[in-house]
């Protein structure tokens, strides 16, 4: 039987990332290799993404009257 799976080593044991169908207390031969390293692309933090999209619409009561500006309801 050959099974390929990913596991994380926590310093003491290998922990599989998915369920495995193996017999407990049974001896297995394990081949250990690291997966190819992907270049990690740094993502902007969510607040930076929101701030980058923010625009000054020149409306001073936008937060209080957002229903009026979005849906055309009466101002409160």
Image: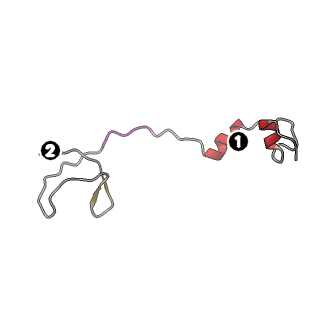
Query: Is 38 included in the stretch rendered in magenta?
Result: yes
Q: Position of residue 41 (x, y in %)?
A: 50, 38
Above or below, 16 relative to 72: below
- Horizontally, is 45 left or right of 67 in the view? left
Q: Nearer the viewer, residue 27 or 32?
A: 27
- Say what secondary structure mark 1 lies in: helix
Q: Quadrant of residue 4?
A: top left
Q: Nearer the viewer, residue 62 or 36?
A: 62
Name the residue tied to disc 1: 51
Name the residue tied to disc 2: 2
Q: Residues within 10 Å of mark 1 (few under 14, many from 20)?
A: few
**In terms of secondary structure, what is the magenta stretch mainly?**
loop
Q: Position of residue 25 (x, y in %)?
A: 14, 64
State which region is magenta. Answer: 35-39
Give me the disc on residue 71. Answer: none
Residue 47 seen in the current view: yes
Which residue is the extreme one toward the front? 74
Q: Residue at x 62, y 45 (%)?
A: 46
Query: Is 46 included in the stretch rendered in magenta?
Result: no
Q: Residue at x 16, y 62 (%)?
A: 24
Q: Nearer the viewer, residue 53 or 12?
A: 53
| Mark 2 or 1, nearer chain start | 2
């Amino acid at each position: 039987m050959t099974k390929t799976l990913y596991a994380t080593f926590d310093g003491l044991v290998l922990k599989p990332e998915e369920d495995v169908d193996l017999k407990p207390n049974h001896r297995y031969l394990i081949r250990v290799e690291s997966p190819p390293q992907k270049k990690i692309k740094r993502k902007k933090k969510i607040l930076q993404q929101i701030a980058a999209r923010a625009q000054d619409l020149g409306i001073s009561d936008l937060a209080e009257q957002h229903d009026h500006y979005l849906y055309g309801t009466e101002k409160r």
